[in-house]
Amino acid sequence: MKERIASTIKKAVITLQRKKELKKFKIPEVLVEYPREENHGDYSSNVALQIGKITRKKTMEVAKIISLELQAQSKKVFGKIEEAEPGFINFFLSKGYLQKQVEEILRAEDKFGSLKIGKGQKVNVEFISANPTGPLTLGNGRGGFCGDVLSNILEKAGFKVTREYYINDMGSQIRALGYSVLDGSEAVYQGEYIKKLKKKIKPDCRRAGIEDPQKTGRKAAEQILKDMIKPIIKKMGIKFDVWFSEKSLYGKKQTDKVLRKLKRKKLVFEKEKALWFKSAKFGDDKDRVLIRADKEPAYFLSDIAYLENKFNRGFEKLVFFWGADHHGYIKRMKAAAEALGYSKKQIDFVILQLVRLFKWGKQIRMSKRRGIYITLDELIDEIGLDVVRFFFLTRSPGTHLNFDLDLAKEKSEKNPVFYIQYAYARICSILRKLKMKSAKPRVTTENLKLLKHPLELELIKQLIRFPEIIEDTVYDYQVQRIPQYTIDLAAVFHQFYRGCRVLGKNKELTQARLSLIKATKIVLKNSLDLMGISAPEKM
């Protein structure tokens, strides 16, 4: 509806320009939002304020002529369009339009909310990608669930999505892992899992005469990936399409190829015995090292090769989920994309802030290197996958997340997951009662006209926001909209249930309300599916 209103406003402005009621100008981007106050309508636009500045007309005068033109074009959709100070145009959906939407939802079923804006565009979403130096912790979980849900949303919007995990099996962290297993001077990793690796790998390495920390680290990393990372990712309900090894970039000489490409473009130079990339030329803060003075390749070289590899696989858009400590890498990666001949707009980054776990109001301190942490495995076992998924999704990725373990364990309406699932189970219970009476809900245009109660209309308004929530998330990756939307929908449904008797004496009204709760069931299920959360029929 937001898009529809924006398009209708543009047409109205063009018509007014043709009638010479407005002078010719480039129409600005039309923003349509949900008003904070109910008496300001269902949707609102500030377009008259923008046009008033361009035309130097009074904003309320502009709002008035646009409003009149819109009323002539959209009588069936809007019951009322009005102007409000200092120049807003407020839209009130008509009862007839809202009633018809129930029928549309019932017809679409699990396809409701599906969009075509992706047009089959190939998108690579890379997330988690934790170094294979230990078990996955809470921070990894946040990126995992957010990346998985964004992938679901992009697929719902018509994109062809590949979920990818990048295995950092080269470099200093692998060497440090090797030293930790071999009890070397540069050991940094501790904990029970290191003790287990020592028992499993150290004797094999000694028998084979391999005391090299890099080789030992790689062997340990393979074991960690097999025993500690892949099983928990499966437990998280995530399925990766591609597991990509950094080591393969060197084995297939892809780092050499990308280096030659940059040299041909004259974007590489020598300084202080090292080889540098002219990343500052493309908007980075400074130039970056590709080959260090000791002739060892820097991480950035494999990053560029990996970027090229993805584009060579036909992806038109790349999305990376990174931890907060990687924020400074964004400019250099965008610089690399442009240097390789691609657009900076083809790569996007979602930066994830820290997760803090709280119990009894106190923060539980964690350190992966010291071996003090709570694993995702333990968390899922303790409170269940549905709750873990939901709680990790509730805040914007760019803000810190305080995970309240006590609230997560609640089996009451205080817990938002329980609150939402109870709404779904309640609908299923009503429909089971209906089935026991051998009655079937009958949808007709006439009985849907009986949905006039403010609580009924408010519920329909909430239902039809679902596609808009998906579209907004496609453009800015703020996946927290989905859990918040589902909480709001459950709240509106519970209000409707308390205020409107579904199985009443008026058979036609009962049929209409049954149609409405069936539509609510569909949208709740579609929302929960996007989040990878179950929809229980009994609780």
Image: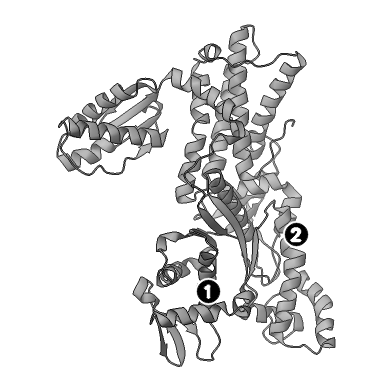
Q: Quadrant of residue 23?
A: top left
Disc 1 crowd rating (10 Å Cα; few below 14, some 14-19, many 20+) is many
Q: CA distance from mark 2 to mark 1?
A: 29 Å
The residue pinned by badge 1 equals 305
The residue type indicated by label 1 comes to Ala
Q: Which badge, 2 or 1, is on the more N-terminal residue?
A: 2
Secondary structure beneath dot 1 equals helix
Residue 221: % across, % down: 71, 73
The residue type indicated by label 2 comes to Pro
Q: Quadrant of residue 224?
A: bottom right
- Is the N terminus in the top left, top right, bottom left or bottom right quadrant? top left
Residue 359: % across, % down: 67, 52
Q: Residue at the spot x=59%, y=26% of the render?
A: 106
Q: Residue 136 — which label? A: none
Total marks in image: 2
Judge by depth and name the residue closer to the eye, 83 or 9. 9
The residue pinned by badge 2 equals 231
Q: Residue at the spot x=71%, y=60% of the render?
A: 375
Disc 2 crowd rating (10 Å Cα; few below 14, some 14-19, many 20+) is few
Q: Are marks 2 and 1 in contact (CB under 8 Å)?
A: no
Q: Residue at the spot x=31%, y=44% of the render?
A: 29
Residue 391: % across, % down: 62, 47
95 in relation to 179, above or below: above
Q: Nearer the viewer, mark 2 or mark 1?
A: 1
